[in-house]
Amino acid sequence: MFPLFLATIMARLFSPGDKFMSKPYWRIRTYLFLATSLHPIVDAMTSGGLGVAFFSPFSNHRFFFPFRPIGVCSIGLSGMFSHRGAMIVLSEFVWLWAPSLALAGVSALLKRKQKNLVS
């Protein structure tokens, strides 16, 4: 429920001039809902930490997914600038940044194609 609540409140704040339930409002709300919802899912795919309390505050049980390809780097600059840190940054690129960039690219191409069809 938290992602839905947060997305609704923040969309209202970020689109004050737009009418409630307008297209810009829904775009912002959907983006914020997805970003807030996907964050704990990605956290559950990491190899460190205590797990994710998906059902907090109703349950303190923490979960990890069986498939955990994303490494967790130790906090601090020394951990980031080591061989292990470089491997973790690479795994984040492969599992997070590359798919995100591909999705953004496809979205931009579809938007451009739609704009050209309207013109």
Image: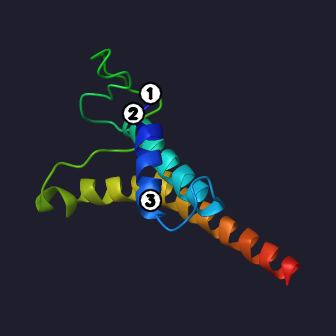
Query: What is the quadrant of residue 63 in the picture?
Result: top left
Secondary structure at badge 1 equals loop
Secondary structure at badge 2 equals loop
Would residue 60 be found to the left or right of residue 2 on screen?
left
Pointer 3 local density, CA inside 10 Å: few below 14, some 14–19, many at least 20:
some
Q: Which residue is mark 1?
A: 65
Residue 99 horizontal/vertical position (percent): 56, 57
Residue 116 horizontal/vertical position (percent): 83, 81
Q: Residue at x 31, y 15 (%)?
A: 59
Counting residues from the start of the chain, the first of labels 3 and 1 encountered is 1
Residue 90 horizontal/vertical position (percent): 40, 58
Residue 71 against residue 50 in the figure, above or below: below
Q: Which residue is mark 2?
A: 44
Q: Which residue is mark 3?
A: 93
* Structural distance between the alpha carbons of marks 3 and 1: 19 Å
- Judged from this view, the residue extending furthest toward the bottom is 119
Looking at the image, which is closer to me, 106 or 98?
106
